Image (cartoon, rainbow, N blue to C red):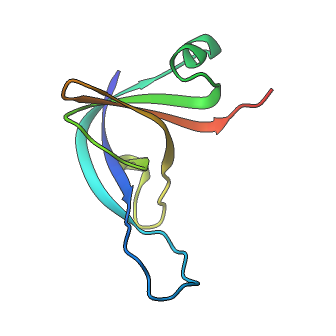
Amino acid sequence: MILKDIILLTKQTKASADPLNHTVTYSEKPYFSAKVTELNGATAQNNSIGAQYEHTYVIRLQGIHQADKVAFANECNSFNKRSYEIIQIRHHHFKTDIYVGITKVSS
């Protein structure tokens, strides 16, 4: 487990006046010292998520949170907005577990 600063990204639901404008904007919410664990091995990934990914992270947060994507603060700057899709969000009595997968593996 590593403590990392992350950014929770949530889609904005602001309607556009232009029907052809399909741009998506995200609101950013920083979270400091999230507990990040990398899931190694196909068995661990299949048991927890039900699929295999190139890299899989479990991010544990205090409190109840919602997000559409996650970015690691050290990878996100003004030139590089790398973010990761959330596979699953689980809530456990004032805690949130976010499962993030990078590049799903197909057999």
In the image, is residue 62 above or below residue 15? above
- Determine the residue positioned at 47% across, 29% down: 57
Horizontally, residue 73 falls left or right of residue 107, namely left
- Image-based side of 91 in relation to 87, left or right: left
- Judge from the rendering whether residue 30 lies leftward or rightward of residue 102; answer left or right: left
In the rendered image, which quarter is residue 3 located in? top left
* Residue in front for this viewpoint, 18 or 99: 18
- Residue 103, percent from left and from top: 65, 39
Q: How many numbered dots are placed on residues in this image?
A: 0
Left or right: residue 50 compared with residue 3: right
The spot of residue 19 in percent (x, y) is 54, 84
As drawn, which residue projects farthest toward the right? 107
Q: Position of residue 5 (x, y in %)?
A: 29, 42
Residue that appears at 61% across and 11% down: 43
Hey, which quadrant is residue 49 in on the image? top right
Q: Quadrant of the N terminus?
A: top left
Q: Quadrant of the C terminus?
A: top right
Residue at 41 percent of width and 55 percent of height: 76
Residue 105 vs residue 82, the one in the foreground = 105
Q: Position of residue 44 (x, y in %)?
A: 55, 13
Residues 99 and 4: in front is: 99
Q: Nearer the viewer, residue 96 or 34?
A: 96
Which residue, as the protein is rendered here, is positioned at the far bottom?
A: 18
Q: Residue at x 36, y 48 (%)?
A: 67
